[in-house]
Each structure stands twice: as structure tokens, then as C-alpha cells.
Amino acid sequence: MADAEVPLLDDVVEGSVDFKGRPVFRSKSGGWRSASFIIAVEVAERFAYYGISSNLISYLTGPLGQSTATAAENVNAWSGAASLLPLLGAFLADSFFGRYRTIIAASLLYIAALGSLSLSAVIYSMSSSDCEVAAGMKACSPSQFQVVLFFFSLYLVAFAQGGHKPCVQAFGADQFDEQDPVEKKAKSSFFNWWYFSFCAGVLVSLFILNYIQDNLSWALGFGIPCIVMGLGLIVFLLGSYTYRFQVQSDERSPFLRIGQVFIRACRNWRTTHSAIDMELEAEGILPYEGFQQYKYINKALVSPYGSKQNEKTWCITDIGEA
């Protein structure tokens, strides 16, 4: 009876551990039981992001009183930052925190940012009641504090999505074992459903939030995404004990590994190109155009030149001469 309760050895998922770092079993972790939690937080994040970005220029030209040209400039700057920040999020996730912790940190940052956006809108609605009424319409300029709070919160949203965007889909894919035929097929289905859910979240956001922001209240239009993001984080955390976490074979930073290539090439600055060609031939690597284009970096392929003392010598050379 006791033996029947012990999972089979072939049920162990190689290269993955559970929430506590223990080996995971296919029958008790991963797959759709985990992917559904991850899709939920993705839908919440896309709902929140597009709920802000899709109608942003209306808020800038409306409550903030900016010209169309200035508003378009600010939207483009923010969109550019939001497009580049996933590079930082991917680096932090791969090098330091892991995808799971990065998603949690990004979600908390999202909630704080959306809450601050809602607060800035509430401040505007409260201050607008004291504005002078001219020609039957309220003419009100936002306070400096409101403008600073709004843009600070807006760029916090950009940082938050920079942590979400490179991690959520990849973490969902980690829940499926490529070595298992059934899970391999389910993984393809996961990407289809992930994209469908992604688009559904955007569609609902465009229809509902834009209407609320334009016709009811900006504070409510910013507050609803904050609540949805909070619910999404709760759902994501509920699946923590079902997730599979990939075991990293090399925990060094990718930037560190890239830097070591340049350092080794620098140490080998005296190495001739004929020696590099011999090294490539010995390794069975055929030359191609890329090797000719980056000849200096090719020096990292061979063993350090000279004695141990020479290996510690700093390299000062003209890369162009290489």
C-alpha cells in the first residue's frame, strides 16, 4: 500500500524542481494545471496596460491640458521606454531573480503604479471643483504635484510591464516537458490559448475602460485595472505549489559570460590569425563570413597566450588593426 503511494521514477520531470527546490512529478505539477494560473495573470496585465496606453493621449490633452503635439511626444517617449524595458526585465530575471520572482515583483509594482495613477486622477477631480467656471465650462490647470505624480506613476507602469513581458509566456512554457509527447503537444496548444487570452484582455480593455474613462471617471478608469491586476496576482500566487521551476545549469550572468569573451580576446591580443585558423581546424569548425567580420573576438577561441603573468596583463590594442 505504501509502495503504491510513491510516484514512479519515470514520473519525475528532469531539469525541474518545485516551489521548495525538490524534484517534481509530472502527475502533480506543471501542464495545464499550472498554465491556467499563468494565463490569468497575463490577461490581467494586458488588460491593465492597454487600459492605460490606448486612451493615454486623451488624458494628456484633457485633464492635463497639453497640446496634441506635446501629448503625442509624451506618448511616444513613454511607448519607447516601455518597448525597451523588457530587455532590462529579461536580464534581471535570467541573472538574478528568476521568472517567478520577477513576475511577482512586476505585479506589485504594477499595482502600486496603477494606484498612484488613480490617486492623480482623484486629485484632479477634487481640484477641478474649485476651478473658475467660464462660458459654462470648467477651466482648470493641473497642479505641479498632479503632473509629477502622473508621469512618475506612468513610467512605473512601463517598468512593471518590462518585468512582465519577457517572463510570463516563458514561465508558462516551462510548465510543459518537451520530453513527454503529451505535454509537448499541449505546449503548442498553450501558445495558442495564451495569444487568444492576450487578445481577449486587450479587446475587453478597449471596449470597457475607454468608455469609462471618456464618459464616467478617469479615477475609475485607472482604478479598475489596479483591482484587476491585484486579482491577477492573487490567482498567480495560488498556483505556486503546482509550478515547475527550471534548473539553471549555468547561473552566471549572461552579461558576465559575454564580458569574459572580450577579456579572453584581450588577453590573446598577440595571437596571430593563422593560430586561430589552426585552432578552428583542430576543433572541426569550418570558417564562415562571421569569423572574418569579427576577427578580434575570434581570439577568445584559443588558449591564453604566453605565461600566467602575461594572462594577467591588461590589453591595450587597436581593435581596428585586428
Image: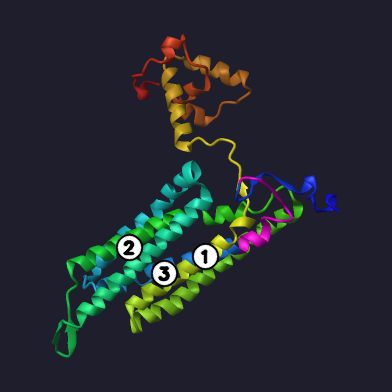
- Give the numbered dot on residue 226: 3
Q: Which residues are magenta?
A: 21-36
Tell whether 145 sits left or right of 193: left
Number of marks in the rendered image: 3
Q: Quadrant of residue 269?
A: top left
Assess disc 3: are there few (<14), some (14-19) or many (≥20) residues with their C-alpha within 10 Å of its C-alpha: many
Look at discs 2 and 3 and give the one toward the viewer.
3
| 299 vs 67: above or below | above
- N-term-proximal mark, 2 vs 3: 2
CA–CA distance in space, label 2 to label 3: 13 Å
Label 3's element? helix
- Type of the residue with mark 3: Cys
Q: Position of residue 58 (x, y in %)?
A: 30, 74
The residue identified by callout 2 is 154
Look at discs 1 and 2 and give the one toward the viewer.
1
CA–CA distance in space, label 1 to label 2: 23 Å
Task: Tell me, yes or no, if residue 275 can be seen here.
Answer: yes
- Give the numbered dot on residue 234: 1
Q: Position of residue 18 (x, y in %)?
A: 63, 49
- Type of the residue with mark 1: Ile
Q: Position of residue 204 (x, y in %)?
A: 49, 75
- Type of the residue with mark 2: Leu
Which residue sits at x=28%, y=66%? 150
- N-term-proximal mark, 1 vs 2: 2
Of the pair 308 and 239, the residue shown nearer to us: 239
Q: Are marks 1 and 2 in contact (CB under 8 Å)?
A: no
Of the pair 51 and 247, the residue shown nearer to us: 247
